[in-house]
Image (cartoon, rainbow, N blue to C red):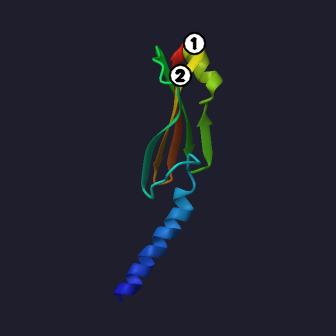
Amino acid sequence: MVQKKILLSFLLLVFFHLVFVSCASPGFGPKGFIFTKTKIGVYGTGEPSKRRVTSCVHSILGLFSFGNASFEFLKSRSKIQTVTETNWTTLVVLGVYANLCVEISGNE
């Protein structure tokens, strides 16, 4: 009886993961089963920077995705000409909502 409950719980967790967690995903990096929040340093020169800007893209259930986190968009919002650091931040909640934020730092 106990083994059946454990097996059933495991199968439900696997089903939940396949159906929901895989729906909304930033597409890279480690992913938690229930919650993910990571920050990944992609590029850095070690030089000091005067400006910093962040923009995000969002996904809901893997059905709707919106936002602009391109370098061109970020540079135009901040007037950064020379990028000294780039970081990516991801957030996933139950596979229902996910976002990927790109942060750049640099100078004019």
List the single residue furthest toward the top.
108
Callout 2: few (<14), some (14-19), or many (20+) C-alpha neighbours within 10 Å? Answer: many
- Vertical order, 57 against 47 (above or below): below
Front residue of 42 and 95: 42
Q: Earlier in the sequence, mark 1 or mark 2?
A: 1
Q: Is residue 104 above or below residue 23?
A: above
Q: Name the spot of residue 33 as percent of width and height, x first.
A: 45, 58
Q: Which residue is depicted at the point 48% across and 16% down?
A: 51
Mark 1 secondary-structure assignment = loop
Q: Is residue 77 above or below residue 54?
A: above
Query: Which corner quadrant of the image does residue 108 belong to?
Result: top right
Q: Nearer the viewer, mark 1 or mark 2?
A: 2
Q: Quadrant of the N terminus?
A: bottom left
The location of residue 73, given as percent across then percent down, is: 62, 22
Q: Mark 2 belongs to which amino acid?
A: Thr
Task: Report the residue that reaches farthest toward the bottom.
Answer: 1
**Which residue lies under the disc numbered 2?**
84
- Give the CA distance from mark 1 to mark 2: 13 Å
Left or right of 79? Residue 94 is: left
Q: Which residue is mark 1?
A: 79
Residue at image coords 56%, 57%: 22
Question: In the depicted view, which residue is nearer to us: 40 or 64?
Answer: 40
Q: Indicate the amino acid at tag 1.
A: Lys
Q: Position of residue 82 (x, y in %)?
A: 58, 16
